Amino acid sequence: MKQKIGITCYPTVGGSGVVATELGKLLAERGHDVHFISTSLPFRLNKTYSNIYYHEVEVNQYEVFQYPPYSLTLASKMAEVIKREKLDILHVHYAVPHAVCALLAKDMVDHDVKVVTTLHGTDITVLGHDPSLRDIIRYAIERSDKVTAVSRALATQTKDMLESQRPIETVYNFIDERIYRPQVFDQDLRKSFNIPHENKVIIHISNFRPVKRVLDVVNAFYVINNETPSTLLMIGDGPEKTRAWQRAEELGIDDRVLFVGNQNHVVDFLNISDLMLLLSEKESFGLSALEAMACGVPVIGTDAGGIPEVIIDEETGYVCNIGDAENAGKAGAYLLKKPDLYQAFAEASKKRANDVFSSKSIVRQYEAIYDEAKGGD
Ligand code: GMT
């Protein structure tokens, strides 16, 4: 059934914004009308679609109020769009504040819209620990018409933390396989970064928040580089970048660690990489690991959250304990030194990315959830 679907996400760089935007594009390609309601145009919305609309949420700063009223402005805009466009579904990414805003908007209008909430992690793994927010997160989850989480680990953690019986369906993240695939090896990109011909390329992509443990990434790389000459590409930016750079200097490997900042075409970097390191202490899914796998790049990850649902230990990469950079490095070096095993892992990574996380199957899962939400009147 064709639906009118509103989508709210954080539109800036970040896995949840990427997934929400890519989902909107796929839904539009399948004939649904899609309405993005957010503070700026989602950065991945880089193509024109006649059935994708954008409704900007303009958050003003008022002199009398200390904080700009983002949530209220968003709820108000949601109500306006539900009413004017007769939305069937409002699909929000993050329980807090987006699901709360959607529920308020639903209450404001005389139109039966269904609220579908997707949990991406941070509202549960960080905010859920704050007793002052737990009740509002529980409210958002229990009152949504459907709730999904991006991994089984996150679904379980949410239920345990909130002591809630609310069914939460796992719908994994996906990638656009038209973009994330092995492509012709770009010798020029390697050359432009002066990466020596014999070096293996190790990649890490994140927002360098403390939960990403980027110092462990540098420490693990140190172990790899001691056994196999390598270069570490650090893609992204964030609060731990300076400390990571200092750590590389302390270890005397700063000439081999390249901090290249945020990048729009991450796929080009993945396609010159041999191995990814994702050593987070919290990670509900790990979209960058999936992007790497789709390009045939095995991943060394930690046993945090949903990472072991993405990487299969000893098949598409290795799963190490959180904080055990030494073993992560050893596992990486071991794999890089065994060409046959490496090739098998690279093939298994591509296959798993395309079989389990295919965009076609994930978009259908969301469509079924929307249909069930509508059918449950
Ligand atoms: O990891 C972040 O800090 C960004 C955050 C986001 O909002 O994009 O990522 C979360 O959602 C992604 C998409 O579902 C997941 O792939 C990430 O694992 C998740 N991050 C955490 O759980 C820390």
Image: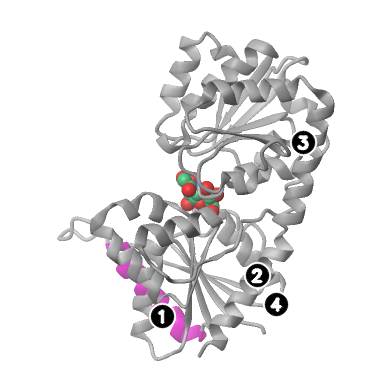
Mark 2 or mark 4, which is nearer to you? 2
User: Given contact means CB atoms under 8 Å apart, are the residues at marks 3 and 4 in contact?
Assistant: no
Rendering coords of residue 159 (x, y %)? 42, 62
Rendering coords of residue 370 (x, y %)? 58, 78
Badge 2 amino acid: Gln
Query: Toward the viewer: 51 or 171?
Result: 171
Query: Toward the viewer: 364 or 125?
Result: 125
Q: Is mark 2 within 8 Å of ligand 1?
A: no
| Crowd around label 3: few <14 · some 14–19 · many ≥20 (10 Å) | many
SS for tag 1? helix
SS for tag 4? loop
Mark 4 lies on residue: 31
> Which of the labelled discs sits on residue 80, or is there none?
1
Rendering coords of residue 108 (x, y %)? 34, 84
Mark 4 or mark 1, which is nearer to you? 4
> Can residue 160 be seen from the camera position used here?
yes
Q: Main secondary structure of the magenta part?
A: helix
| Crowd around label 2: few <14 · some 14–19 · many ≥20 (10 Å) | some
Left or right: where 270 falls relative to 261: right
Mark 3 lies on residue: 345
- What distance separates the C-alpha of mark 1 from that of mark 3? 50 Å
Badge 4 amino acid: Gly
| Crowd around label 4: few <14 · some 14–19 · many ≥20 (10 Å) | few
Q: Which residues are magenta?
A: 69-86
- Residue at image coords 72%, 36%: 297
- Residue at image coords 65%, 40%: 266
Query: Toward the viewer: 123 or 177?
Result: 123
Residue 249 falls within the magenta-colored stretch: no
- What distance separates the C-alpha of mark 2 from that of mark 3? 28 Å
Mark 2 lies on residue: 365
> Which of the labelled discs sits on residue 193, or is there none?
none
